[in-house]
Image (cartoon, rainbow, N blue to C red):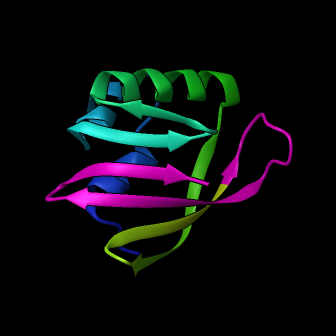
Amino acid sequence: MQLPRPIHTYFTALSPQEGDTFVTAFTPDAVVHDEGHSHRGRQAIREWWLASKAKYRHQAEPLDMAETAGKTVVRATVTGDFPGSPAVLTFTFGLSGDHISDLEIG
């Protein structure tokens, strides 16, 4: 499966050493919705990502990708230190050029 470059970066960046690479995949004013919270802007997204990686020590392996209503939807198997692991989650990406403008994880 050929993921768009910023989405590939989202799934392959290593925490914490590739935090700069990870966050530059997003637009400066991007927003991430995860676990009932919104994280807006690169700094907030970086902090969310690092905290989430430290807490859950998770990895996501994309299963499939589809385009729906102008969004790129990726289903991925997520494994880590959380109840119900592994779980299949849906990542709905909005893209703006070669960057992620919004992401909803559910």
In the image, what residue occupies the spot 31% across and 74% down? 70
In the image, what residue occupies the spot 39% across and 47% down? 10
Above or below, 89 against 40 in this view is: below
| Quarter residue 54 falls in | top right
Does residue 99 show up magenta in the picture?
Answer: yes
| Quarter residue 77 falls in | bottom right
Q: Quadrant of the N terminus?
A: bottom left
In the image, what residue occupies the spot 35% across and 29% down? 18
Compared across the picture, whether 9 is left or right of 86 comes to left
| Quarter residue 22 falls in | top left
Magenta segment, prevailing SS (helix, strand or loop): strand
Q: How many labels does the image show?
A: 0
User: Which residue of the protein is positioned furthest toward the right in this rendering?
Assistant: 83
Above or below, 27 against 66 in this view is: above
Q: In which quarter of the image is the C terminus?
A: bottom right
Magenta-drawn segment:
78-106
In the image, what residue occupies the spot 46% across and 69% down? 73
Front residue of 66 and 3: 66
Front residue of 27 and 53: 27
Does residue 10 show up magenta in the picture?
Answer: no
The x, y position of residue 84, in whole percent, is 85, 48
Above or below, 105 against 18 in this view is: below
Compared across the picture, whether 24 is left or right of 12 comes to left
The x, y position of residue 102, in whole percent, is 35, 50
Residue 76 appears in the figure: yes
The x, y position of residue 94, in whole percent, is 32, 59
Residue 17 appears in the figure: no
